[in-house]
Image (cartoon, rainbow, N blue to C red):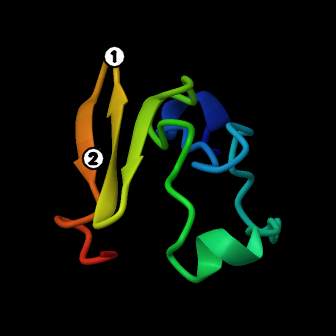
Amino acid sequence: MSNVMDMDARYNPFTGEPVVPGHDEAIPAAAALGLEPPRYCEQCGRRMVVQVSPDGWWARCSRHGLLESAKLERR
């Protein structure tokens, strides 16, 4: 029998809510098109510092570092 605590927790990058396996979560339309940057860290669920510019965006988690749209090919 597996324990849920043994699994790495994942969080929704747009709402910060924990991701539940087998539960389909709604993604905002702008985020699905790649126009909305993530606001929460997927690894810890913390709110990130986000900067949007005309040519992309970056988001920084205080624990897990920088995430850039150029690296994700979402420019």
Q: Secondary structure at mark 2?
A: strand
- Separation of disc 2 and disc 1 at Cα? 11 Å
Q: Where does the image place residue 65, in percent across and percent down from the top left?
A: 23, 30
In which quadrant will I find the N terminus? Answer: top right
Pick whichever of labels 2 and 1 is earlier in the sequence: 1
Q: Is residue 11 left or right of residue 62?
A: right
Q: Amino acid at mark 2?
A: Leu
Please say if 55 is above or below 12: below
Q: Which residue is tagged 1?
A: 62
Q: Where does the image place residue 10, in percent across and percent down from the top left?
A: 55, 44
**Residue depicted at x 51% and y 40%:** 7
User: Are the residues tagged 2 and 1 within 8 Å (C-beta)?
Assistant: no
**Residue depicted at x 52% and y 50%:** 38
Please say if 17 is above or below 33: above
Q: Secondary structure at mark 1?
A: loop
Circle on res. 42: none
Q: Is residue 1 left or right of residue 39?
A: right
- Mark 2 packing: few (<14 Cα in 10 Å), some, or many (20+)? some
In which quadrant will I find the C terminus? Answer: bottom left
Q: Amino acid at mark 1?
A: Ser
Please say if 1 is above or below 45: below
Q: Which residue is tagged 2?
A: 67
**Residue depicted at x 17% and y 65%:** 71
Outermost residue to the bottom: 33
Q: Where does the image place residue 32, in percent across and percent down from the top left?
A: 62, 78
